[in-house]
């Protein structure tokens, strides 16, 4: 964590050894490579670091025990790295800095990017952490449908922020950090680190981190190979006590830790990896990124959302490896605190489950029909989306303004053509 400069009023109020994030503290500008200068309002967006939010975090930390804060953080992750550091960290620091990794997305799913992200961030705020969402907009230039237009990417990021606002994320206590701005201000520190990461690993290893399978083995863009190096640099440049990632970023997280060991880096943040929900269809051919029914999106029309839920795989009486039950576990119960399922006999009665455990027992015994469970989930999700996104005109306007055309940038089109030439050239070779 960066050094803290205290004003005399802070020392008088609480004591310099305990104040870490009140309205009168400021971060030492030489201590952190990528910190925001809150005094320079010309460089901040309207979402950035309001002082009143920091006072609120400080108050929460003072009123909540470290064990309660640890419990809040422990309810988030599917896996923890250096979890044993968290209890001591929470006792030592009233407002540890927690960074949340996020790459702007024009197709915002309800799990990793929408509803679940709101739930997790609010829990981190509840734990008294200083929360900063690192909006990795600069990296989105790799997207084959977006290209290098940072203005368009910023619009997409603003749309994501409006969606979080609409779903109740506690943005008054969250600072949004745009990576593109950080790179402009600190390029001299960032790029040597990214290059050093690239020197220590093979090109084959870097290529193994590419999750986009649309590229042929001979046509993987160099940007995809260098991307892990840039991401590791972005992670390590932040003065973070805690990082929150989704499980699909685990390989990159471990690469960052491996590099830290390689260079004998002394400070290593605790890592929280939250779960990623399974895709809805049973047929693996329907789980392609090009198939929109694979998951639910924040901007889905109610008819489309209902159709996806109707077609979702939810085998009766199966409670283990049932993908649909995971949506109930990680979306409905954290959001509403219960699940109401209408009686399948159609007599107008219903049963409300206060815990996932009670629900699983009934479902596994066959007392609940999968169709009724789907209807209960459908009702809950539609309630969330109707109450928030539909009523947020700013989110809708940004969505329609940044909706991408079905086109591919020139560079990627060239790569695809090269791949086709390679494939056709091989097919014409004599046997």
Image (cartoon, rainbow, N blue to C red):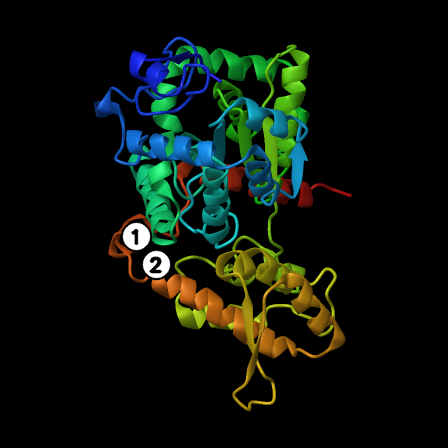
Residue at horizontal 39 percent and vertical 53 percent from the top: 167
Q: Is residue 57 above or below residue 285?
A: above
Q: Quadrant of residue 270?
A: top right
Is there any visible trace of residue 310 in the rendered image? Answer: no
Q: Residue at x 58, y 44 (%)?
A: 76
- Residue annotated with mark 1: 395
Q: Nearer the viewer, residue 267 or 263?
A: 267
Left or right, residue 131 beside residue 250: left
Residue 350 on image: x %, y %: 55, 81
- In the displayed structure, does residue 304 sit left or right of residue 340? left
Q: Is any part of residue 175 visible from this angle?
A: yes
Query: Is 34 placed left or right of 324 in the picture?
Result: left
Residue nearer the viewer, 417 or 302? 302
The quadrant of the picture occupied by the C terminus is: top right
Mark 1–mark 2 CB contact (< 8 Å): yes
Element under disc 2: loop
Quadrant in which residue 73 is drawn: top right
In percent of width and height, residue 163 lies at: 36, 50
Circle nearer the N terminus (1, 2): 2
| Element under disc 1 | helix
Q: Position of residue 92 (x, y in %)?
A: 55, 22
Image coords of residue 80 (percent x, y): 66, 35
Residue at label 2? 389
């Amino acid at each position: 964590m960066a050094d803290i400069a205290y004003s005399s009023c802070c020392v008088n109020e609480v004591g310099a050894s305990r104040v870490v994030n009140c309205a009168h503290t400021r971060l030492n500008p030489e201590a952190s490579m990528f910190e925001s200068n809150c005094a320079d309002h010309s460089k901040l967006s309207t979402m950035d670091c309001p002082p009143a939010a920091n006072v609120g975090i400080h108050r929460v930390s003072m009123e909540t025990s470290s064990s309660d804060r640890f419990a809040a953080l422990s309810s988030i992750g599917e896996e923890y790295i250096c979890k044993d550091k968290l209890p001591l960290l929470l006792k030592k620091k009233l407002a540890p800095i927690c960074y949340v990794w996020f790459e702007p997305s024009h197709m915002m799913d309800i799990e990793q990017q929408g509803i679940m992200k709101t739930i997790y961030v609010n829990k981190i705020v509840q734990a008294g952490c200083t929360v900063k969402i690192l909006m990795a907009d600069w990296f989105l230039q790799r997207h084959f449908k977006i290209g290098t237009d940072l203005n368009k990417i910023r619009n997409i990021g603003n749309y994501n922020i409006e969606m979080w606002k609409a779903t109740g994320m506690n943005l008054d206590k969250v600072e949004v950090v745009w990576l593109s701005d950080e790179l402009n201000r600190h390029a001299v520190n960032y790029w040597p680190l990214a290059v050093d990461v690239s020197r220590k690993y093979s090109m084959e290893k870097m290529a193994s981190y590419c999750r986009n399978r649309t590229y042929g083995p001979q046509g993987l863009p160099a940007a995809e190979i260098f991307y892990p190096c840039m991401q590791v640099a972005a992670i390590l440049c932040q003065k973070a006590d805690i990082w929150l990632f989704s499980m699909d970023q685990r390989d990159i997280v471990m690469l960052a830790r491996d590099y830290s060991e390689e260079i004998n880096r002394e400070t290593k943040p605790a890592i929280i990896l939250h779960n990623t929900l399974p895709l809805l269809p049973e047929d693996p051919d329907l789980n392609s990124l090009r198939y929109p029914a694979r998951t639910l999106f924040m901007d889905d029309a109610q008819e489309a959302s209902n159709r996806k839920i109707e077609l979702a795989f939810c085998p009766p009486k199966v409670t283990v490896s049932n993908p649909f039950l995971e949506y109930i576990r990680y979306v409905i119960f954290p959001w509403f605190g219960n699940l109401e399922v209408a009686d399948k006999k159609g007599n107008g009665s219903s049963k409300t489950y206060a815990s996932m455990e009670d629900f699983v027992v009934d479902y596994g015994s066959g007392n609940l029909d999968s169709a009724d469970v789907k209807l209960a989930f459908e009702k809950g999700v539609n309630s969330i989306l109707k109450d928030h996104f539909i009523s947020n005109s700013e989110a809708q306007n940004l969505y329609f303004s940044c909706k991408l055309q079905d086109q591919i940038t020139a560079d990627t089109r060239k790569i695809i053509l090269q791949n086709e030439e390679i494939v056709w050239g091989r097919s014409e070779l004599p046997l």
